[in-house]
Image (spheres, grey):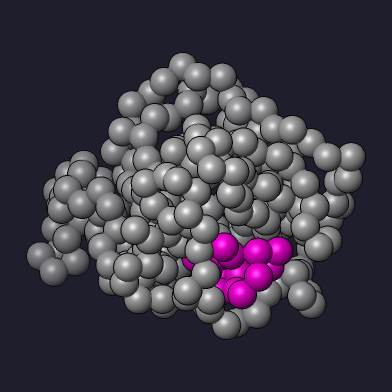
Amino acid sequence: MLMKCHIKLLLSAMLLWSLPMFGGNGSIQQKPIRKAKTTTHQQAGKNTKVKGPTAGKATENTSSYVDLGLSVKWATCNLGTSAPQYFGSFVSWGSTWSETPEFDWTFYPHTVSKTWITKYCTDPDMGYSPTKGQKGFSDNKTTLEAKDDVATVRLGSPWRMPTQAEFQELVDKCKWTWTILKGTAGYKVVSKKNGKSIFLPAAGYHLEIDHCDVFESGAYWTSSLSKRNNLEAFALYFSKDGYRVFPCERFVGYYIRPVRK
């Protein structure tokens, strides 16, 4: 299983440097990848089970956010924890719980297989209706409903997951610097508008039963479906070499940074 994490890291790195940048409206823009400034410190660690304070606390901080002068306010820490250096909760896209035997298509809630999607589908050739028991289903839903938005479910309105456009805004209108915060590698994201900042920990991601690339990469879900391939949704992916928003397979376990108006 751990070998798959290594392979996934290589593929992610290749995607990070080779894919075109996706704009906030889903259109492809031929932008260069954003390269990060790097501190002299780098945190080691990969393919490890996280224990102790890095794993985070179960408490939620529902009132702490930072106004970066953007279209939404960003929570100071990840969903499921109470300090910015902790990792918090991880889920597949459209799921509201982390307790799954494995992060793969078998246990993903909105498919009957990798091929047939039961919710959030714009392509009838990929859709299946469980109630009607037939193929050709589409609901044309491209943004997670509140009941499938884990930030809204756990924190209540007005908290929610960021959209693709909102994460792209964070990329475009902030300065990103790879750093260490209290022993945790990640990005300090500083607003170009007002100088305020948030920290995004390099918490890795969850594939099948493995927690991969801890302290080496970060992956955060948006609430936005990929219209090009309904098996994918948009996520922010980063490593110390750069960062971008692009489509990823819906079943993988990524982290959540809530937003609100």
Residue 203 in the image, given as x and y percentages of width and height: 67, 58
Answer left or right for 125 relative to 66: left
Q: Which residue is the extreme one toward the bottom?
A: 59
Residue 172 in the image, given as x and y percentages of width and height: 50, 32
| Camera-nearest residue between 136 and 30 | 30
Question: Can you see residue 60?
Answer: yes
- Magenta-drawn stretch, dominant element (helix, strand or loop): loop
Residue 78 in the image, given as x and y percentages of width and height: 57, 65
Residue at 31%, 72% in the rendered image: 157
Question: Can you see residue 229?
Answer: no
Q: How many marks?
A: 0
Q: Which residue is the extreme one toward the top?
A: 30
| Camera-nearest residue between 96 and 4 | 96
Q: Which residue is the extreme one toward the left?
A: 132
Q: Quadrant of residue 131?
A: bottom left
**Quadrant location, the C terminus:** bottom left
Instruction: Tell me the magenta residue range.
Output: 75-92
Q: Is 201 above or below relative to 32?
A: below
Residue at 60%, 82% in the rendered image: 58
Q: Is 48 above or below relative to 217?
A: below
Q: Is residue 87 magenta?
A: yes
| Camera-nearest residue between 227 and 3 | 227
Q: Is 24 above or below relative to 50?
A: above
**Quadrant location, the N terminus:** bottom right
Q: Which residue is the extreme one toward the right?
A: 40
Answer left or right for 85 relative to 139: right
Residue at 67%, 28% in the rendered image: 35
Q: Quadrant of residue 90?
A: bottom right
| Camera-nearest residue between 57 and 225 | 57
Q: Is residue 40 magenta?
A: no
Residue at 14%, 58% in the rendered image: 134
